[in-house]
Image (cartoon, rainbow, N blue to C red):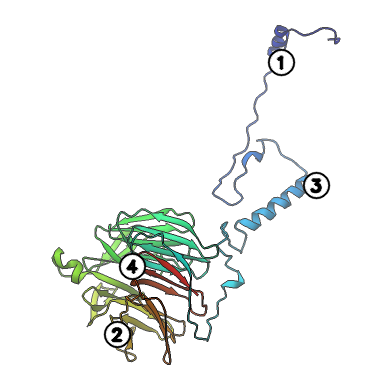
Amino acid sequence: MDGRHEMSEEEYKRLRKSQPKKKKVPREDFGDPSEIGGFKGPWSRFVGICEDTKTPRDVKEEYSLKKIVNKHCLTAGKERSRSSYFLSMKDPSLGRVPSKKFLVPKSNVMLFHDHKDMVSSAILFRKHKLFLSSGFDGKAYLYNLKDRELVTTYMGHSKGVSSAIVSECESKFSTVSFDGFLKGWDVETGRCNTKVDLDCPLTCQTSEALDKAIFVGGIDGRVRTVDMRSRAVLDAMIEERISEKDAFKTFSIRDILTINDSSLVFTRREGSLHYLDLRNNQIVKSLRNSYSFVGFSHGKNAIMATGQDEIVLLDAHTLEKKEEEIKAPECSTPAKASEDGGILCYGSSKGLVSFFTSKSTASFGSAGEMITAVDWIDGSSSSFISGDILGNVKIWE
């Protein structure tokens, strides 16, 4: 073609047909997007084509990409989440030293009212700036303390959530409900990874590690051992039969606490406290009183049994009283203890929270709705949370 001849459309089509067809070179697999750094995306290479040398521009781009990945994702030996409210496990702020000073919160600095019914659990995360709450509206909520906002809503129960507990690593938690289901959740993704139907309204739970066994109490008065890995009920405490009419009023298990690998204690709604041997699933000792909740003081190695107007410290093995009863008028929550056991706190049915030591007592809050859940990290004046019967969750400082 000399430039003076204009190619017609038919000639152009014949020319295109006469040329050999080009085969598409397949690309490499894009990779797994669920793995950090595993997703190659549109920039994945073609199959059979490789670059022997890297240009200075390639090296610069690779360095820039590595900085972005290391900033936001998992890096070797320094685990970190994409979320800003999760901290690195090596973050210096995680090294908490309990304060020797008796610190009492004075004012309410945050208020959350997403729950439409009573708050059953309120848990402060020890390693992250988060807290979790569950309620009788059948939901659980995760909040960010740093930004003062709701992060995730966990829905899936058809009836009220009676208890929620968080794993030691704080990456997952479990809930039990009056709908009879035990569910395991992933904290960050919000997914329900485990679902076990126990065919009985559930009232409480306790665990040392969520990836192993969980002990669950129900209104039928039985303690069930559930393997979270196989999702199977391993065994249950053997008890005498009772009528369904009286189950919730007297026989229902109200609170439960693991002492060690071979024993736990639990209370019933009618006020009795029982020591259960897990090796043969038999009750070996019982106390008849007005006990409602149980907690554990690591500083004094004692069980904190809460009654309506007192808190009793019991020996963890014999259930003998270690000290004189502590007066706790109108107590409506389990007691929380400092690491050394020198300070105790609890919530009351009058809407007040009380802190006390052997020498002094202090209360805060305003007379109002009954407090149903509390949590406290000693040594920090801003690490106290309370939930009430109307579904309000408060952070105190």
Q: CA distance from mark 4 to mark 1?
A: 80 Å
Task: Please give the label number shown on residue 389.
Answer: 4
Element under label 4? Answer: loop
Q: Is residue 267 left or right of residue 123?
A: left
- Residue 248, given in percent of the width and then of the height, sits at 20, 67
Contact (CB < 8 A) between labels 4 and 2? Answer: no
- Which of the two labelled residues, at mark 1 and mark 3, occupies the earlier sequence position? 1
Q: Is residue 229 visible?
A: no
Q: Nearer the viewer, mark 1 or mark 2?
A: 2
Q: Tell me what residue is drawn at x 45 percent, y 54 percent.
A: 190
Q: Tell me what residue is drawn at x 25 percent, y 78 percent.
A: 274
- Viewer-closest of 395 and 185: 395
- Which of the two labelled residues, at mark 4 and mark 1, occupies the earlier sequence position? 1
- Residue 282, given in percent of the width and then of the height, sits at 23, 74
- Which of the two labelled residues, at mark 1 and mark 2, occupies the earlier sequence position? 1
Q: Is residue 178 above or below residue 342?
A: above
User: What residue is shown with label 1?
Assistant: 19
Q: Residues within 10 Å of mark 4 (few under 14, many from 20)?
A: many
- Identified by mark 4, the residue type is Ile
Q: CA distance from mark 2 to mark 3?
A: 73 Å
User: What residue is shown with label 3?
Assistant: 56
- Identified by mark 2, the residue type is Leu
Q: CA distance from mark 4 to mark 2?
A: 31 Å
- Residue 74, given in percent of the width and then of the height, sits at 60, 58
